[in-house]
Each structure stands twice: as structure tokens, then as C-alpha cells.
Amino acid sequence: MDVENDVWVSELSKKQFCFAELRTLMVATDWGDSREMEELAIAGHARALLEWHKISRFCGNCGGKTIPIDAGRRKQCSNEACKKRIYPRVDPVVIMLVIDKENDRALLSRQSRFVPRMWSCLAGFIEPGESLEEAVRRETLEETGIEVDEVIYHSSQPWPVGPNSMPCQLMVGFFAYAKSLEINVDKTELEDARWHSREDVKNALTFAEYEKAQRTAADKVDQMCKGVEKGLNFSSDFNVESGELAPMFIPGPFAIAHHLISAWIDQTCINSS
């Protein structure tokens, strides 16, 4: 072992470790550190594979037990008469910022599992035989009663921190332009949905203090590793610098919702014709 590795092992042995949820680590990671972000991406890939292995123990073709192959990146049926190869499943999810162009507003929603005052974009799974654009229109109509006309692609993001039964999600982001404005919330899907002015959303981006949230979460993870705060709830409120609670905030830069909303605020989204 060379001297450099010797020093690295020595430093590593001084550190304390603990288990933390990947969603927590997304907040705690220094988003400006490329190495940390690369390590977080590896952790996300690993979690998605582990969850996929957990729910893919049997062959969907014959019911035989599956075994891992190709270093765990694939599975194969152990039944010699079948031997079907099974690949990790990716569930595409559309996530959309619905825009009222005439009144310069965006539609944001809340789910009951959200931390207090957090608002985000609408999202939903794609049905068989449905295009991405059709899914955006259907989900928006079903959840809020808003009819959508033009749908424009923005970007995509892997999301390995969804429910355990759906570990391999791909978030596909869109801007969607509303052609009706009256909201009728489906309470089985959402807690609330409202139109928000550009100014209010811009203030939410300012008040959320994501760097402060990152430092706070990183400190709490460090405390957990020292055994100080085991089982800590990381869904803490964000405060404005004055110490007063911000009226609302949106997900941080680790989430595609943040970038959809930021692009609209910066007016870098493609305008509807």
C-alpha cells in the first residue's frame, strides 16, 4: 500500500459512520462539490438496484426463483426450462409546471406527506399506451381539473428515492400551458393546489435558504454518526434570514421541480406560441 493510501485509510479510521436515508443525504450533500455529487449518484444507483432485487425475487414468466447475474445488474430465472433474463425496471413519471401565461402564474400543489409550507409541481405515472404529453394532460386534469394545451419538454432526472415498491423512477419534466383556470382538487391525490404569482414564487426561491438547509442537515447527519440524535426527523422548517417563517418554499436544487420552477422564474422556459 502506498503512502497516500496509507494516509487515506488512517484518516478514514478516525471517522464515525451511521445509516442515513438517501433523501436526507441529498439535502446534506454539498451540491457544489462534484466528488460528493458523484458519490451521491453512486449511492442512488445502488439503492435503486437493491430495492429492485428485493421485489424481483421470482420470475414473472414461470414463478421460478431468480438469481443475480452480471454482478447484480441483471437477474435470471433459475428454472432451466425458462431461464428468462430480467432487467431493472424504470418507471417513467411526468412532472410538470403548469403555467397560466395570460396572468403570469404557475400552478403549484401540496401533498399531505410534504413538510409544512412546501409546494411543488404536479406529477404522475404514465399509463400503458400513453405518450408523455398525454400523461401530462391527463394527470393535470385528474388532479386539479385544469385543462392543458401545449406541453413542452424541459429535462429529466433519475429518482431513486421513491417508494420502496417503485425504486427506479425517471422523472421527465415539462412545462404545460393551461387553457382553463378553475381549480378542482382531487383530495385523494393532493392536499391542495393553487395558482401562485411569479413574484410569490420568486420570493419562495429567495426565502428557502437551501445552503442553510444543507449545512443544517449535514450537521445533523454528523450528530447521528456520533450517536447524539438517532432517529432524528430531518423535515425541519426553513426560515428566512430575519428568523421569520417563509410563507412558502419549494424543493431544493436536488429536485427537478426546483429547476422547472427556477427556469420559469428566470424566463428561460420556451414560451407557448
Image (cartoon, rainbow, N blue to C red):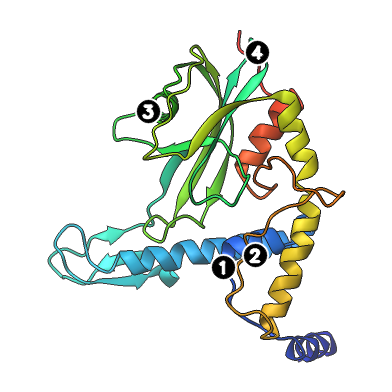
Say which residue label 3 marks. Answer: 142
Of helix, strand and loop, which one carries label 3?
helix
Query: Of callouts 1 and 3, which one flags the residue occurring earlier in the amino acid sequence?
Result: 1
Q: Is residue 92 left or right of residue 24?
A: left
Nearest to the observer: residue 75 or residue 109: 109
> Which quadrant of the structure image shows residue 27?
bottom right
Label 1 is placed on what type of residue?
Answer: Glu
Of helix, strand and loop, which one carries label 2?
helix
Q: Is residue 95 visible?
A: no
Front disc: 1 or 4: 4
Q: Tell me whether the residue at label 2 lies in contact with that at label 1, contact meaning CB atoms closer than 8 angstroms.
A: yes
- Tell me the CA gap for discs 4 and 2: 38 Å
Q: Tell me whether the residue at label 2 lies in contact with that at label 3, contact meaning CB atoms closer than 8 angstroms.
A: no
Front disc: 2 or 3: 3
Q: Residue at x 73, y 38 (%)?
A: 204
The answer to whether residue 209 is above or below residue 97 is: below
Query: Of callouts 3 and 4, which one flags the residue occurring earlier in the amino acid sequence?
Result: 4
Q: Position of residue 108 (x, y in %)?
A: 58, 32
Say which residue label 4 marks. Answer: 103
Label 2 is placed on what type of residue?
Answer: Leu
Q: Is residue 135 visible?
A: yes
Nearest to the observer: residue 163 or residue 74: 163
Say which residue label 1 marks. Answer: 21
Label 3 is placed on what type of residue?
Answer: Glu
Of helix, strand and loop, which one carries label 4?
loop
Query: Of callouts 1 and 4, which one flags the residue occurring earlier in the amino acid sequence?
Result: 1
Q: Position of residue 124 (x, y in %)?
A: 43, 38
Image quarter (top left, top right, bottom left or bottom right) of the N terminus: bottom right
Say which residue label 2 marks. Answer: 25
Q: Residue at x 16, y 63 (%)?
A: 82
Q: Which mark is residue 73?
A: none
